[in-house]
Image (cartoon, rainbow, N blue to C red):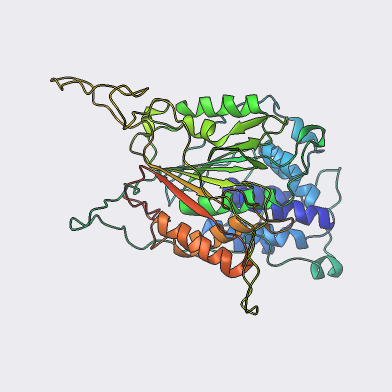
Amino acid sequence: MQQQHKDAIRSNFSSLVARTDLDSVVTALYEKGVFSEPMIEPYRNVADSETDRKRKLYRTIVRRGPYAFGHLVDALGELGYWDLVRDLDPDSPFAFASSRTFNPIPKLPARPADNEAFLSLSTTRPRVDTNKNVPRTSPPPSLPPVETSEKDNATCDDNMGPPFTVIKSTKFMEDDDTKDLKLYRTRGRNRGMLLDFTYTEFDNDIETKRNGSNVDSNNLKYLFSELGYRRLGYQNLTKSETIATLKSLNDVLVNIESVFTVVSSHGYERAHSSDLDVRCKDGQLISLYEIMDYFNNRNMPALYGVPKVFIFQMCRGSSGDYTWSTELQEPARAPHLPMPRGLGELHDLHYDGSPDAPGRRAAAPRSPGALQETPLYSDILIAHSTLPGLVAHRDGKLGSWYIQALCEVFAERAHDCHVEKLFTLVDRRMQSKFHRQTSSVDRWGFNKRLYLHPGLYES
């Protein structure tokens, strides 16, 4: 298999594992001659989880010779996984099988119970009978049967897939009546949603391509799938598409227990404000506060009381991070780093000031049936990959430093740590590995503990 095809499978590994039906894909590949009857036996072994068997499938297929990739793409296209086909091979005829018209609200499949498998997208393809041998049909004329070569085996990367394993919870964290801080409730099967806004390429080369950002997206997709979250991914949207998507979310984010929103792009510091501008695909800018405004309690009342975590992977200025060297007796003074500024002007807030201060409302006496006022912003946690004024580092092959550390820490400790502690450990991990970037976390009325309870659901 060519290296570019291996790379395509690697970069989409988490999507292939999370979204495809094992039985359907194995059957299709068997019929195309990619696997023989004895070779498909491990994928019938119910002693291993379906997820583990799918991981094994996509790690094995890169060993199946120079035509295996083409057969995989054809199989996925025939089964209706057109978006996966577009990600793997944009030139495939199946990549044009569905409309490319922008749709801000993709249809979400219902999350299956633990003892259920995803339904196959194909209802006509015959299944492999586990009780008898099934004669293999002839492979399609477009590609010859698979022939495995020793050279192809030798160059296979056995470490394909995300470099971390999510540890699952064994018990729910309980509220402690002796503590001041209660817990957000995260016990149901509709655990939450991951919203991923990633901007990688920009029109007219107004900005450099953000190599490695696709690795971040794939790792986050895999991580949150393992944590029990569904995902909506949006890549390279224009500003108008971004706004349309944000407006549409009010109809999508219902009856969920938590929301994580990741925004990854080039960022630009604003003068005299703690706000930040984000570059969209068409070169236009949208600010972080404008994005978060769509999630406030007025615009999205269904999420009042629901924890909303924002993760911003982007530069917040042009200065590099500086470190002190322990080998120097009198280390040179680091350049002045801008301090975090105030939150700036936020809409519809009440002000603590004189009775005549702009925006101040006189407190009206309460009466039975009167509407209860609620804060405009609450239950929001904001995680920045770097400090105000500083750059955020990104590896073109492994992804950004911050998302690397975040995925590792969440995978290792989400089963026994609340989210604020996780972000503390993320910063410690990032400084331990890379030594020169500092993250930050802000709380906007985030007044409870959020545990993610990966793999654990109330019956």
Quarter holding residue 281: top right
Query: In terms of depth relative to the viewer, which is nearer, 140 or 11?
Result: 11
Q: Is residue 96 left or right of residue 80?
A: right
In this view, 102 is above or below 38 = above
Quadrant location, the N terminus = bottom right
List x then y, in percent, for residue 126: 64, 43
Up/down of 408 relative to 289, above or below: below
Residue for point 58% across, 26% down: 243
In this rendered view, identify the residue nearer to me: 210 or 49.
210
Where is residue 433 shown, x and y percent of the image? 61, 68
Residue furthest out toward the left = 368
User: Quick one: 444 or 339, which is closer to the camera?
Assistant: 339
> Residue drawn 62% across and 36% down?
277
Across and down, in percent, residue 346 comes to: 45, 30
2 sits left or right of 211 in the view: right
The x, y position of residue 179, in whole percent, is 22, 57
Q: Quadrant of residue 161?
A: bottom right
